Amino acid sequence: MAKKEETITAGYPRIEKLIESENFDEVNRSFGSAFEELNKISKQKSGLGKGKAAKKAMRAYELSMDLFKELLKLKYQMMEVLKKEGSKSAK
């Protein structure tokens, strides 16, 4: 029997799939529409701290996008290292 190759995972399959595929269209649409709504709420003069909460949520979306960018950067760095190691072992 052939040994089944084990896949190493960090426990976040949807995020890992997103980073692997680099297909951010759905995420961009979702984040964009949510960000627009939050921006409208943050500009309204209403009580109960809705504006402050909306601004905090907008910041969370920004940080999430920064995280995706950082994960992609790490992916490319890892791919470069693997590429270099592969070319060394082929010699």
Image: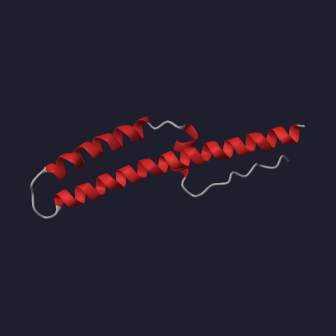
Q: In this view of the protein, which residue sits in the foreground, 70 or 3?
A: 70
Report the side of 17 relative to 2 (left or right): left
Location of residue 51 with respect to 71 vertically, above or below? below
Residue drawn where x is 68% and y is 42% of the image: 79
Report the side of 46 relative to 29 (left or right): left
Disc count in the image?
0
Q: Measured from the top left, where is residue 34 in percent x and y?
A: 28, 45
Location of residue 90 with respect to 34 vertically, above or below? above
Q: Measured from the top left, where is residue 63 in percent x and y?
A: 40, 53
Report the side of 6 relative to 35 (left or right): right
Colour convention of the picture: secondary structure
Q: Measured from the top left, where is residue 64 in percent x and y?
A: 42, 52
* Residue farthest along the bottom direction in this orientation: 48
Q: In this view of the protein, which residue sits in the foreground, 91 or 26?
A: 91
Residue drawn where x is 39% and y is 39% of the image: 28
Residue 85 figure quarter: top right
The quadrant of the rendering that contains the C terminus is top right
* Residue farthest along the right direction in this orientation: 91
Residue drawn where x is 23% and y is 55% of the image: 54
Residue drawn where x is 28% and y is 41% of the image: 33
Q: Measured from the top left, where is residue 26 in percent x and y?
A: 41, 38
Q: In this view of the protein, which residue sits in the foreground, 36 or 1?
A: 36
